[in-house]
Image (tube, grey):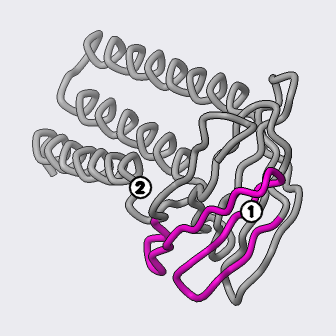
């Protein structure tokens, strides 16, 4: 197979993988682990582009292309590692299940003095588990006092201050409307 044909095939594969990475960024299905899909697909795209250029050039040019590709790969891996360190991990406080879906109260903001509580809805498990935010609290607010499924399309969050928030959930994409984000801890 001629070198140019191999390079074109690698470039087309890189474009396809780049498109998949863009789809992972858009995340229409609210995948909980979409950021890992994105970072992995970008890494594969960089590898494919490096290989495509390395196939075309010869001699010292190939060494230069491979060196630049290695620097890009190490740089991307460093960015992903640093971002994963900053992101932090939410701690589950409570959970209510309804069939294959779960309403989970999570405690976030590990670097804040006061924890920030949120309510997310999750569906499925494993690498394709879905997650959408239903309610995002503010600092100095206590955890929601109750969460429940009203029916198959509606969820409800009750705060300790007595506020009641309802949201509609789309079954396939797990889109939530509206996502409640109060501005103060002492009011609705």
Which residue is depicted at the point 74% across and 62% down?
158
Which residue is depicted at the point 69% across and 42% down?
187
| Label 2 Cα crowd, 10 Å radius (few <14 / some 14-19 / many 20+) | some
Q: Residue 21 carries which label?
A: none
Left or right: residue 41 compared with residue 60: right
Asked if 71 appears above or below 87 in the picture, the reply is: above
Which of discs 1 and 2 lies nearer the camera? The answer is 1
Q: What element carries label 2?
A: loop
The image shows residue 54 at horizontal and vertical percentages of 28, 28
Quarter where residue 78 is shown: top right
Check if mark 1's residue and mark 2's residue have beta carbons within 8 Å.
no
Quarter where residue 85 is shown: top right
Quarter where residue 116 is shown: top right
Q: Is residue 149 magenta?
A: yes
Q: Is mark 1 on a helix, strand or loop?
A: strand
| Label 1 Cα crowd, 10 Å radius (few <14 / some 14-19 / many 20+) | some
Which residue is depicted at the point 47% across and 15% down?
71
The image shows residue 133 at horizontal and vertical percentages of 59, 55
Q: Is residue 132 magenta?
A: no
Asked if 105 appears above or below 155 in the picture, the reply is: above
Q: Which mark is residue 27?
A: 2
Which residue is depicted at the point 41% across and 39% down?
42
Q: Which of marks 1 and 2 is nearer the N terminus?
A: 2
Q: Give the range drawn in magenta.
A: 146-175
The image shows residue 153 at horizontal and vertical percentages of 52, 82
Q: Which of 10 and 134 lies nearest the eye of the viewer?
A: 134
Q: Which mark is residue 158?
A: 1
**C-alpha span from label 1 to label 2:** 28 Å
Asked if 185 appears above or below 176 in the picture, the reply is: above
The image shows residue 180 at horizontal and vertical percentages of 56, 52
């Amino acid at each position: 197979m001629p070198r140019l044909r191999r390079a074109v095939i690698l470039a087309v594969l890189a474009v396809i993988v780049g498109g998949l990475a863009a789809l992972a960024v858009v995340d229409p299905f609210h995948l909980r682990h979409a950021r890992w899909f994105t970072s992995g697909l970008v890494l594969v795209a960089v590898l494919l582009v490096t290989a495509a250029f390395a196939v075309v050039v010869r001699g010292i040019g190939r060494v230069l292309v491979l060196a630049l590709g290695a620097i890009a790969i190490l740089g991307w891996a460093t960015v992903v590692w640093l971002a994963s360190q900053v992101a932090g991990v939410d701690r589950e406080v409570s959970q209510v299940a309804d069939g294959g879906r779960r309403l989970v109260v999570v405690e976030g903001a590990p670097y804040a003095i006061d924890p920030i509580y949120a309510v997310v809805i999750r569906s499925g498990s494993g690498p394709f588990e879905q997650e959408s935010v239903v309610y995002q609290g503010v600092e100095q607010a206590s955890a929601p006092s109750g969460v429940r499924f009203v029916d198959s399309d509606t969820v409800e969050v009750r705060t300790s201050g007595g506020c009641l928030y309802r949201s509609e959930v789309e079954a396939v994409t797990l889109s939530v409307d509206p996502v409640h984000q109060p501005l103060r801890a002492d009011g609705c």
